[in-house]
Image: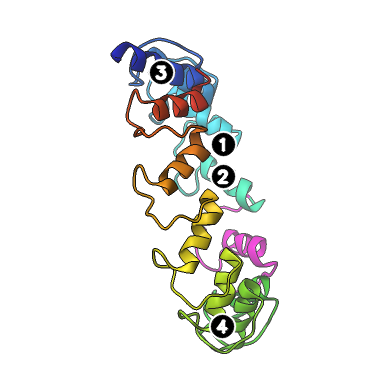
Amino acid sequence: MLHHWAEDYCAVICFITELWYPASLSSGTLHHWAVVRRITGLWYAASLGCGTPHHWAVVRRITGLWYAASLGCGTPHHWAVVRRITGLWYGASLGCDTRHHWAVIRGITGLWYAASLGCGTRHHWAVVRGITGLWYAASLGCGTAHHWAVVRRITGLWYAASLGCGTPHHWAVVRRITGLWYAASLGCGTPHHWAVVRRITGLWYAASLGCGTPHHWAVVHRITGLWYGASLGCGTAHHWAVVRRITGL
């Protein structure tokens, strides 16, 4: 059994690294370098610390630069990352009202206004309009115009009621998930519960998803293609079915 497990472990390693060496993934080992090569294209036996070859290979992947400087504010790496995000090279921090800040705001909202994202400000409303299609100067609190716009997006309804159990909004959400309108909670054994179970497993049995129950096996069958009454413990039929799915072995 131990030999069988070792073979599966190596199959997973081989799948990730293309290597079969039974060594750990610690720094300097063959597996470690295979992973490093996948990420950086380099094989150097050095850590990923700042200034090392691996570090710069990763930096080059992210920024297109090889400079031996930290990613601190104002350094070349920092600005390379900023340019990637904002399209700008300005030597300012991303603090509120700076050019980088507004470049990010424009990316999110399409606006350049020098106002915070606080409730009622222009940025706030630009974000609200993106979510709801509305410009109303009201909070997203329950019952407000924004709130209902969001509710309509989710449920298709405009009712001025909370999403509490039994309210129209609640049932609209339930119908979206289960296809049912029953006025019962999603507790185990209730109609909603079984509608959700049927969606996941294709079964209607009034049993828990505990190991060995019909629901449990329906889920196992979905994942592994097997119906065996055994746990997914190492070496069992389910375990190997999962291993085969992952590794092809």
For the point 39% across and 55% down, the residue is 207
Camera-side residue: 31 or 181? Answer: 181
Distance between mark 2 and mark 4 Cα atoms: 47 Å
- Comparing marks 2 and 3, which lies closer to the viewer? 3
**Residue labelled with disc 2:** 81
Please give left or right for residue 159 compared with residue 208 in the image.
Answer: right
**Residue labelled with disc 4:** 168
Camera-side residue: 7 or 80? Answer: 7
Lower position in the chain sequence, tag 2 or tag 3: 3
**Residue labelled with disc 3:** 8
Camera-side residue: 232 or 88? Answer: 232
Lower position in the chain sequence, tag 1 or tag 4: 1
Please report the bounds of the magenta region as a residue range.
Answer: 89-116
On residue 62, which mark appears? 1
Which SS type dominates the magenta stretch? loop
For the point 52% across and 33% down, the residue is 225
At label 1, which amino acid type do we have?
Ile
At label 3, which amino acid type do we have?
Asp
**Marks 1 and 2 in Cβ contact (< 8 Å):** yes
- Comparing marks 1 and 3, which lies closer to the viewer? 3
Lower position in the chain sequence, tag 3 or tag 4: 3
Q: Quadrant of the N terminus?
A: top left
CA neighbours of label 3 inside 10 A, class few (<14), some (14 to 19), many (20+): some
Please give left or right for residue 112 compared with residue 194 in the image.
Answer: right
Residue 127 in the image: state x and y as whole percent. Answer: 62, 72
- Comparing marks 2 and 4, which lies closer to the viewer? 4
Camera-side residue: 225 or 150? Answer: 225
- Comparing marks 1 and 2, which lies closer to the viewer? 1
